[in-house]
Amino acid sequence: MVPNKLSIKTANSFLKTMKEMKSIILSSDELIFDFRNTKYISPTGAVLLMCIVDSLNENGVRSSARTGRSGLLYNLLSTLGLLNVSENIDEVFQKIMAKYTVQLERCMSYEDCLKVQKKIMANLSETTDCVATTKASIDYMLDEIYENAGTHGYMKYEKSTSYPLPVYMCAQSYKTHFEVSIYDRGQGIHNSLMQNKDNLGFNAKESIEASIEKAITGHPRKSPGFGLYSAAQFVRGNIGGELHIMSSGRFLSVDADGILNQKGYLVAGTMVTAKFNLLSETPFSETLEGDFSLENQLDLITDLINNYE
């Protein structure tokens, strides 16, 4: 049964249940997701469900949804892109929700991710009064995180290269608040860090904490490893901001009060969820100053351009 609210707060326990039922599920022909008691699904829940469905299909297990042909939940599933419907069951609801939702997308390349990023930023501009520093931070963060998915997750260092599996992206704005979730099914943060001999002593718990430190997770093309570090700095300076990372059997949460590193149940791949208060300033310029300022990165930028030619 899908929980009453499938969001970042309940995702880990939902994954735990799925793990405990794994052998039963994989020996079945079909898994039915029971949404009858579910009232809300966040972007995190949407990417999680779609990834599970895709994984089941690859293992020969069909999946279906148990929900009525009416009501808000059915329309929410449709709006998020989790159900394909030929007609609008509640046209008014769908129009309202669609205004604030960037539907779940399966991206098979950097270019696909870039298209979704443009949709997200257009949605923020059209439907919210997002302050300039927060909009700039979200825009910068999106590119960093989905590029991480390609380089670290799937080890595809050329932007023109297709991914072997999707990068899932979904976002919603709530007038004053914003949430985005990005999920790849690659090797995970711990395995990625183990490719650097300086990180060989890290266990999974240490790896996920190291991922939000400056210059830890750079890829072989000399990227400075600034994506998750900058995202963590952004949310720490945004009133109500949150960053959640699931990877390698760990679940890391970051906000202004500190970090929480607990056991997680997402074993394969990495899911990153970020939340922002759109009316709060975010330390965009301050985060990009110093070692990662444009002035100090000219050599790096030149190298990257040469490598992508």
Image (cartoon, helix red, strand yellow):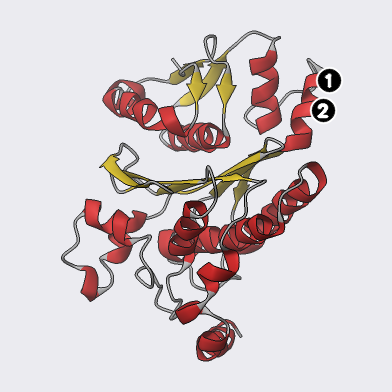
- For the point 53% across and 42% down, which residue is it? 240
Q: Position of residue 89 (x, y in %)?
A: 78, 15
Return the residue at label 2. Answer: 95
Q: Position of residue 268 (x, y in %)?
A: 35, 46
Residue 84 in the image, given as x and y percentages of width and height? 70, 27
Say which of 226 and 267 sits in front: 226
| Contact, mark 1 vs mark 2 (Cβ under 8 Å) | yes
Is residue 166 shown above or below 63? below
Helix, strand or loop at disc 1? helix
Q: Assign the C terminus to one quadrant of the image.
A: bottom right
Q: Is residue 88 above or below residue 215?
A: above
Locate residue 4 relative to residue 28 in the image: left or right. right
As displayed, is residue 155 above or below residue 48? below
Q: Could you say where residue 76 lies in the image, as x and y percent from the top left?
A: 67, 23
Residue 92 - label: 1
Q: Amino acid at mark 2?
A: Lys
Give the residue displayed 68% in from the left and 35% down from the top.
174
